[in-house]
Image (cartoon, grey):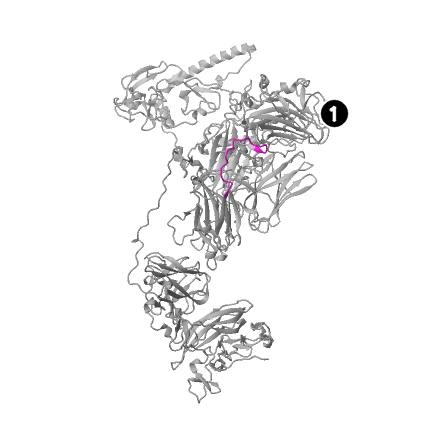
């Protein structure tokens, strides 16, 4: 074994024989050199003997080169060896190869530990060196590996040989800590000019846990020798040193560095021009105005590890001083410290003249991971920075660097040195040895910025001469004007483009640092220095470490020179935001999309959001949060048609500086509003109502491409087989049971952080719904959710499904679309992984030889950040639905049968399908109504109320619990055993969760129909309950409550006349985990249709049958009786386009005004009776079957052949008002073809209105089709031949409604009431106008007490010119103020009743304006004014005003003024109110009796006379007894009328509310809400009796 230790002695400085003077060194052969020239890095002896013991280069291959272990024999030593010579038991302590030869036989120095002592030290020292040059550096390779290898330190040991005891001065040159990897690492250390002898020492300390490899190899000193002596310098630009005779560059003179070796280059230098900071700042000063903090003086290393120098530059050791900026707290990112020089004379000659150049030299040190910026400026005025001469960014290594700057200025100037703090504490910057050469000090002061000549104000170009009108924009070109609505709309409307000059640019790449019209809206100016904000930047300007947080290359060019905009997270705090805002954009087009590229890399990167701001409403349109990787990603925001909007780009800071938000290449694509060309649309285009033409592929896709929404009108889209935007439910899609979990409906963002959309695709705001697959817990990787669509016919042609998909997130799984038949499943689309954080349109073509369905399958990915979302699924017109059963009918019962398509009751009876859910018990056992979502106490289930299948939570059926947040008892039984429905609290419940409960589709309701229910919202939690009314055309909220009320409350919602409607209760979780919203005792009151109130129809266009029933006007004259009395088919002559085909073959086209299409395959023809075997009708549709019909003969045609017939008459453009009625017959084989109905305008694509296919049986079928088109249109019937000869299709009894001919609804004019009467709103009923808003409902529908105001509208005219106690009318007439506010207009225009309180006063009482109440009669004319300002109580006290008593009443002046005695039938203070009839009693009810029973009538009259006599006798007794009970009755009256019960006092939180709804078809609904304890009246009769209600009423009483 060969382990070579080192001797404990100090080597270097050669050998000095005793015969020689100790100041000389013996080179041998009689040659001697001075001792100070030994080990000075220069070979002075002939063969280099003076450097033999201290070589400048050592690879340890032959020996240790004088490097020795100083603290030997402690079992922890530096040892020279090679891997092959290291004993096996310590081989783990040595590198496997050296660095010099990269072999196991090469040598190195390493630390050998062969002792277990706790505290050990290995100290390696170099030979003693001396007189190193100013540029001296040392390089070496080190190996520091192992979990417990510890730290290694290299020091400069300066020896002061002039003192008796050598004072050792240690300066750290290099340190390394812990494991650095299993490899050799290079190191460079700076030694600099050392005038005293010095050593390099390497120390290693073990505290008993050392385990690793620590080694050195290939030590080399560079540029350490002093310059050689020369007889003559090579050029005048050199300085000849005085003693050493060396030559140095003139720029090295007076730079505070001994470059000559004898110091003569630093002699005779001006202290005004140099500063080494050993004695302060010299002539330099700290900036006191333009920076944040100051440079600091320091010796040795800076306080923060891993940043700043270990020593100064002047002395190269810890005793020297230098300046540095401290990057730790309290400094923040981009804080600046500025050092200012003294002023200097202009350098007019400069380096172009005869004088020496003026130069500035300095040394800088920039070590640290977060070094930011050091810059030098030259300024000629006080204040500001001036212009930049030089800058450096980022880490420059652990070295002092020299920089020389040539200065040129025609004016006196100063130099500024600016250091800027990086975005963490390892960013210290140091400077030292600042000096000027060739510069002359200036004794004056620089001028200030304020004293300089002010710049002229900017010249504003005058508005060119113009004749533009108000509201028009003046273009730059002479005489041009455009509308203000055309400014900033992405179209150049002015010929010079000036209307788009000050707008956001369509394309912005931020090159040159330009924002392209975007402005910084937040933080608002003045922007604080350290604010988190958007700014432009480049990769080439980033500092060290920023490459991990923002991109090096931009997206536009992919270069470091390219620009982008970014929000620097080094500034600001967590959650701080910054907004970029566009100018106002006046209009955008239907396809407008904003695309951009974003870069979000970093461990704590925040959020990027895009908002649309319109007026004061701001909606989030897009967002991305968290680390998205080191890559540019595309973002898209669909804007569509909007007006007067601004786009906001918002960056939100994360929890730390690690991750900037970066955006590039923002583009507004297709955003110019379309121009109406005036040309007809092409055959593949849709003609919008406003004249625009759009592609057929954009029709009915939930996006307004027209700008007037005519392409999305649901009547225009009637031909679409199936559409679903998931705003409430799954439409015709169903959840499959063959999967692991279900798809859900969602609004806003998905629960999982960093995935999912910000909005839906339909509404593009947070309230819109979409379908999503939640990928987080409890779902697992590989779990599947499936939904299946409706069944389509194999006759479908050019069928496709269009939908919008959102798949974003690193954990996205797979979305698959399958076409399924009874026997096969075909994969049509398969997408996996992240597809982009935006909605993507997908089109899937569909075709099959069998009936088919579409199945959509979502599979969970590798983690929870990968939600899959769907929205706006549309099957286009080529997709034909197969024959499906009618929706919303009860399931068939297991026993019995009913004839003629009737449905069976549970009791064995039968009822018509149209009687299902009509509020009438047609079965007698209520089985035709019980599953409709009817009146319900929830004691026996939910009564047909159904939960939505896609809600995350549902209404739960439960009982009371005092410990829970749900109600302690139900309302029906008032105990804990009673049932109700509620939204439960759950640990996984999130704010915004919704649960829906819906009824079936109700056929029709009466004018007096209302829904009463009881609700409960726990005060321990929060929730919202809403009630929606859904019809074919709308979904409206009609009631809402969110107040926390810990008791059952009652609500009543008038429904009135409605047809084909649903009711939907929605519960919304108002905060996480919460619940507590409950419902009970739902009651439909008086909802069944009745003939008692004729004319009370759901729609103004309804037809009133002779028996009083109402039917839809589209059912009149459609060749089937819909009225029970058949009155709807009595007068049906003269209808345009009607045809029964009962005519000869050659006349039907002319008489029916139909024409065959010349471009189809074959023609329609007239048929009578049975025309074909086993297909087609056996007779026409007429009652006797003797007429004709129109049919296509399939016997001689091929599959797919088409026959078309079109109306000759052109109908005016309309949507939703024209109805086509006809009867069709499709009987034959199972390969039956298809029948379709189109509307065709003069241009544009034909619009499919209706289609059917398949075998419909051997009977005629009825069709009622709504026809719509934005252009005047004709109607086309198209028959497509099936797959064999038994596929005939026939038509009969065509007719069009009257509204088709005029293009608008035909509304009957209802009878009106006479003057002085009020027309009840919902019924054809009149009541005296004086009964309106009198506090008592007189209309059966109670509408006379709705919409009542508290003050009569109108403005009181000026009051002057009349006497006291008089009122002045507008025409100047003065009337007694007694006539003011008495509900009788006495002024010509009725202004004496303006602004009066609406109150009902008793006989003899006056309306008092000041109290808005009634003044009792005994307080009139008592000499005291009680009712200012007109004092009617003291007016006309001794006379009757002219025409005071109306309707032949008599006026009498009493003690309290005039009083009217009214004639029979009239009442009121002025006999102006028609007396109401007394409430009917049992005796008043007279049955209608046939004329043949006159005897019974006379008997009834006799009985009535007897009863009347008895009543008179009772009345006389009553008046006789009254005087004895007057006192008591007055007390009762006072208690009941004068002091009514103040429910607000007992229940201060109770306030009655009226819901205001903007209905288009129905008047406003008034909704009453009050606590159940004040319910004293008996409820109205229920539509459906429930014995439990009777029990609850008795308990309430």
Q: Quadrant of the N terminus?
A: bottom right
Vertical side of 89 occupied by 1362: above or below: above
Asked if one can make out residue 1000 in the rendered structure from this viewpoint, the answer is no
Prevailing secondary structure of the magenta residues: loop
Q: Is residue 1257 left or right of residue 243?
A: right
Q: Nearer the viewer, residue 122 or 476?
A: 476
Q: Secondary structure at mark 1?
A: loop
Above or below: residue 440 compared with residue 774: below
Q: Is residue 1234 visible?
A: yes
Foreground residue, 847 or 250?
250
Q: Give the magenta part as a residue range.
A: 668-685
**680 part of magenta stretch:** yes
> Hey, which residue is sitting farthest front in the picture?
354
Report x, y in % for residue 1263.
62, 26
- In the image, taking residue 386 as reference, residue 1213 lies left or right, namely right
Q: Quadrant of the rendered structure where residue 35 is?
A: bottom left
Estimate the x, y position of residue 807 in percent, counting from the top left.
Answer: 57, 46
Residue situated in front as seen by the camera: 1597 or 1100: 1100
Measured from the top left, where is residue 794 in percent x and y? 67, 35
Count of number-bearing discs: 1
Left or right for 1469, reference 1341:
left
Q: Position of residue 346 (x, y in %)?
A: 33, 61
Query: Is 1402 placed above or below 115 here?
Result: above
Q: Residue furthest bottom?
A: 19
Residue under numbered circle 1:
1173
Label 1: how many Cα within 10 Å (few below 14, some 14–19, many 20+):
few
- Within the magenta stretch, is there residue 1111? no
């Amino acid at each position: 074994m060969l382990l070579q230790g080192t001797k404990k002695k100090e080597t270097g400085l050669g050998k000095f024989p005793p015969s020689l003077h100790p100041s000389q060194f013996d080179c041998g052969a009689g040659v001697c050199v001075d001792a100070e020239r030994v080990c000075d890095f220069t070979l002075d002896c002939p063969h280099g003997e003076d450097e033999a013991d201290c070589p400048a280069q050592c690879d340890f291959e032959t020996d240790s080169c004088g490097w020795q272990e100083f603290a030997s024999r402690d079992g922890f030593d530096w040892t020279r060896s090679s891997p092959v010579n290291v004993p096996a038991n310590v081989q783990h302590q040595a590198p496997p190869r050296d660095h010099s030869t990269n072999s196991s036989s090469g040598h190195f120095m390493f630390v050998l530990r062969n002792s277990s002592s706790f505290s050990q030290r290995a100290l390696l020292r170099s030979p003693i060196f001396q007189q190193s040059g100013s540029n001296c550096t040392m390089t070496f390779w080190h190996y520091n590996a192992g979990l417990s290898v510890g730290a290694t330190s290299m020091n400069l040991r300066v020896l002061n040989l002039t003192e008796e005891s050598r004072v050792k001065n240690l300066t750290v040159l290099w340190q390394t800590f812990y494991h650095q990897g299993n490899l050799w690492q290079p190191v460079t250390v700076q030694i600099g000019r050392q005038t005293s002898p010095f050593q390099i020492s390497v120390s290693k300390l073990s505290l008993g846990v050392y385990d690793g490899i620590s080694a050195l190899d290939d030590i080399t000193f560079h540029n350490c020798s002093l310059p050689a002596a020369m007889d003559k310098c090579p050029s005048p630009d050199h300085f000849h040193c005085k003693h050493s005779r060396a030559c140095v560059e003139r720029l090295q003179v007076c730079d505070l560095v001994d470059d000559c070796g004898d110091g003569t280059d630093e002699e005779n230098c001006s202290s005004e021009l140099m500063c080494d900071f050993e004695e302060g700042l010299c002539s330099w000063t700290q900036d006191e105005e333009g920076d944040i903090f100051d440079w600091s003086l320091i010796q040795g290393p800076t306080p923060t590890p891993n940043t700043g120098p270990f020593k100064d530059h002047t002395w190269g050791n810890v005793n020297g001083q230098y300046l540095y900026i401290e990057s730790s707290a309290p400094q923040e990112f981009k804080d600046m410290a500025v050092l200012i020089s003294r002023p200097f004379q202009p350098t007019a000659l400069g380096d172009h003249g005869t004088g020496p150049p003026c130069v500035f030299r300095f040394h800088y040190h920039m070590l640290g991971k977060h070094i930011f910026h050091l810059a030098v400026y030259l300024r000629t005025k006080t204040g500001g920075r001036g212009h930049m001469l030089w800058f450096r960014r980022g880490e420059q290594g652990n070295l002092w660097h020299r920089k020389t700057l040539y200065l040129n200025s025609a004016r006196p100037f100063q130099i500024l040195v600016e250091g800027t703090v990086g975005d963490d504490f390892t960013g210290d910057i140091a400077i030292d040895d600042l000096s000027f050469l060739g510069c002359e000090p200036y004794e004056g002061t620089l001028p200030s910025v304020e004293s300089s000549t002010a710049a002229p104000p900017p010249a504003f170009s005058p508005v060119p001469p113009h004749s533009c009108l108000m509201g028009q924009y003046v273009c730059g070109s002479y005489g041009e004007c455009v509308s203000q609505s055309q400014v900033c709309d992405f179209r150049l409307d002015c010929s010079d483009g000036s209307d788009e000059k000050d707008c956001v640019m369509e394309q912005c790449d931020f090159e040159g640092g330009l924002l392209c019209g975007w402005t910084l809206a937040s933080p608002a100016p003045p922007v604080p220095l350290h604010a988190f904000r958007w700014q432009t930047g480049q990769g080439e300007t980033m500092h060290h470490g920023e490459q991990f947080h923002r991109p090096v290359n931009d997206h536009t060019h992919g270069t470091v020179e390219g620009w982008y905009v970014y929000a620097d997270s080094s500034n600001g705090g967590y959650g701080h935001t910054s907004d970029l805002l566009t100018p106002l954009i006046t209009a955008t087009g239907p396809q407008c999309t904003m695309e951009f590229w974003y870069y979000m890399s970093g461990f704590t990167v925040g959020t990027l959001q895009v908002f649309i701001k319109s007026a004061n409403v701001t909606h989030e349109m897009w967002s991305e949060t968290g680390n998205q990787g080191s890559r540019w990603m595309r973002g898209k925001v669909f804007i569509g048609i909007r007006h007067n909007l601004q786009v906001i780009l918002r960056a939100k800071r994360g929890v730390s500086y690690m991750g900037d938000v970066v955006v590039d290449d923002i583009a507004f694509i297709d955003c110019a509003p379309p121009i109406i060309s005036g040309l007809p649309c092409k055959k593949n285009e849709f003609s919008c109502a406003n004249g625009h033409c759009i592609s057929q592929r954009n029709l009915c896709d939930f996006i307004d491409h027209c700008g007037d929404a005519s392409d999305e009108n649901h009547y225009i889209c009637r031909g679409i087989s199936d559409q679903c935007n998931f705003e409430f439910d799954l439409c015709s899609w169903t959840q499959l049971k063959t999967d692991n979990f279900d798809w859900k409906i969602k609004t806003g963002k998905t629960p999982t952080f960093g995935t999912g959309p910000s909005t839906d695709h339909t509404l593009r705001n947070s309230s819109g719904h979409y379908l999503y697959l939640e990928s987080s817990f409890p779902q697992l990787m590989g779990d599947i959710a499936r939904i299946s669509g409706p069944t389509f016919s194999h006759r479908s042609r050019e069928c496709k499904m269009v939908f919008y998909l959102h798949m974003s997130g690193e954990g996205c799984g797979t979305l698959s679309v399958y076409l399924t038949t009874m026997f096969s499943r075909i994969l049509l689309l398969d997408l996996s992984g992240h597809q982009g954080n935006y909605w993507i349109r997908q089109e899937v073509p569909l075709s099959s030889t069998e009936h088919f369905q579409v199945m959509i399958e979502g599979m969970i990915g590798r983690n929870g950040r990968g939600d899959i979302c769907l929205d706006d699924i549309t099957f286009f017109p080529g997709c034909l639905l197969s024959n499906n059963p009618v929706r919303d009918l009860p399931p068939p019962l297991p026993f019995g049968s009913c004839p003629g398509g009737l449905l069976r009751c549970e009791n064995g009876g039968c009822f018509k399908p149209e009687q299902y859910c009509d509020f009438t018990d047609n079965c007698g056992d209520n089985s035709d109504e019980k599953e409709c979502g009817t009146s319900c106490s929830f004691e026996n289930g939910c009564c047909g109320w159904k939960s939505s299948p896609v809600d995350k939570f549902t209404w739960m059926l439960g009982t009371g619990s005092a410990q829970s947040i749900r109600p302690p008892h139900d309302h029906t039984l008032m105990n804990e055993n009673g049932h109700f429905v509620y939204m439960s609290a759950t640990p996984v419940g999130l704010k915004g969760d919704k649960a829906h409960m819906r009824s079936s589709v109700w056929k029709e309701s009466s004018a007096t129909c209302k829904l009463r229910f009881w609700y409960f919202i726990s005060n321990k939690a929060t929730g919202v309950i809403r009630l929606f009314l859904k019809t074919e055309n709308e979904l409206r909220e009609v009631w809402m409550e969110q107040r926390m009320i810990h008791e059952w409350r009652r609500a009543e919602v008038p429904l009135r006349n409605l047809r084909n409607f649903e009711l939907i209760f929605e519960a919304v979780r108002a905060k996480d985990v919460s619940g507590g919203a409950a419902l009970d005792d739902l009651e439909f009151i008086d909802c069944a249709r009745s003939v008692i109130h004729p004319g009370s129809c759901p729609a103004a266009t309804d037809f009133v049958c002779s028996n009083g029933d109402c039917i839809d006007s589209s059912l009149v004259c459609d060749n089937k009786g819909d009225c029970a009395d058949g009155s709807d088919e009595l007068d049906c002559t003269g209808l345009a386009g009607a045809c029964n085909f009962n005519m000869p073959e050659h006349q039907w086209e002319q008489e029916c005004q139909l024409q065959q299409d010349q471009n189809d395959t074959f023609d329609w023809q007239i048929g009578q009776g049975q025309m074909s075997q086993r297909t087609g009708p056996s007779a026409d549709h007429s009652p006797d079957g003797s007429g004709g019909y129109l049919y296509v003969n399939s016997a001689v045609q091929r599959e797919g052949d088409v026959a078309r017939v079109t109306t000759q008459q052109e109908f005016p453009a309309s949507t939703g008002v024209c109805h086509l009625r006809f009867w069709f017959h499709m009987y034959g084989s199972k390969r039956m073809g298809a029948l379709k109905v189109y509307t065709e305008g003069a241009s544009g694509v034909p619009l499919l209105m209706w289609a059917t296919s398949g075998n419909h049986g051997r009977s005629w079928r009825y069709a009622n089709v709504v026809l719509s088109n934005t252009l005047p249109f004709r109607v086309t019937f198209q028959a497509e031949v099936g797959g064999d000869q038994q596929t005939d299709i026939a038509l009969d009894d065509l007719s069009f409604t009257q509204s088709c001919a005029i293009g608008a609804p035909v509304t009957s004019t209802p009878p009106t009431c006479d003057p002085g009467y009020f027309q009840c709103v919902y019924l054809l009923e009149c009541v005296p106008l004086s009964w309106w808003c009198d506090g008592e409902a007189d209309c059966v529908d109670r509408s006379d007490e709705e919409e009542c105001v508290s003050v009569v509208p109108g403005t009181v005219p000026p009051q002057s010119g009349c006497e006291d106690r008089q009122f002045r009318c507008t025409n100047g007439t003065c009337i007694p103020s007694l006539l003011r506010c008495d509900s009788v207009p006495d002024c010509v225009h009725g202004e004496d009743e303006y602004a009066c309180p609406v109150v009902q006063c008793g006989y003899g009482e006056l309306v008092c304006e000041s109290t808005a109440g009634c003044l009792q009669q005994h307080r009139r004319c008592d000499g005291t004014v009680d009712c200012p300002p007109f004092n009617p109580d003291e007016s006309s006290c001794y006379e009757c005003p002219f025409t005071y008593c109306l309707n032949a009443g008599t006026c009498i002046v009493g003690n309290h003024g005039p009083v009217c005695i009214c004639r029979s039938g009239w009442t009121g203070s002025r006999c102006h109110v028609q007396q109401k009839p007394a409430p009917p009693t049992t005796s008043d009810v007279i049955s209608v009796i046939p004329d043949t029973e006159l005897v019974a009538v006379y008997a009834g009259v006799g009985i009535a006379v007897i009863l009347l006599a008895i009543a008179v006798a009772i009345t006389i007794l009553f008046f006789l007894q009254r005087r004895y009970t007057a006192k008591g009755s007055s007390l009762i009256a006072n208690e009941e009328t004068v002091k009514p019960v103040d429910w607000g006092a007992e229940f201060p939180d109770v306030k009655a509310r009226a819901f205001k709804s903007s209905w288009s078809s129905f008047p406003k609904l008034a909704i009453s809400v009050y606590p159940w304890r004040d319910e004293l009246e008996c409820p109205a009769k229920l539509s459906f009796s429930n014995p439990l209600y009777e029990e609850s009423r008795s308990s309430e009483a």
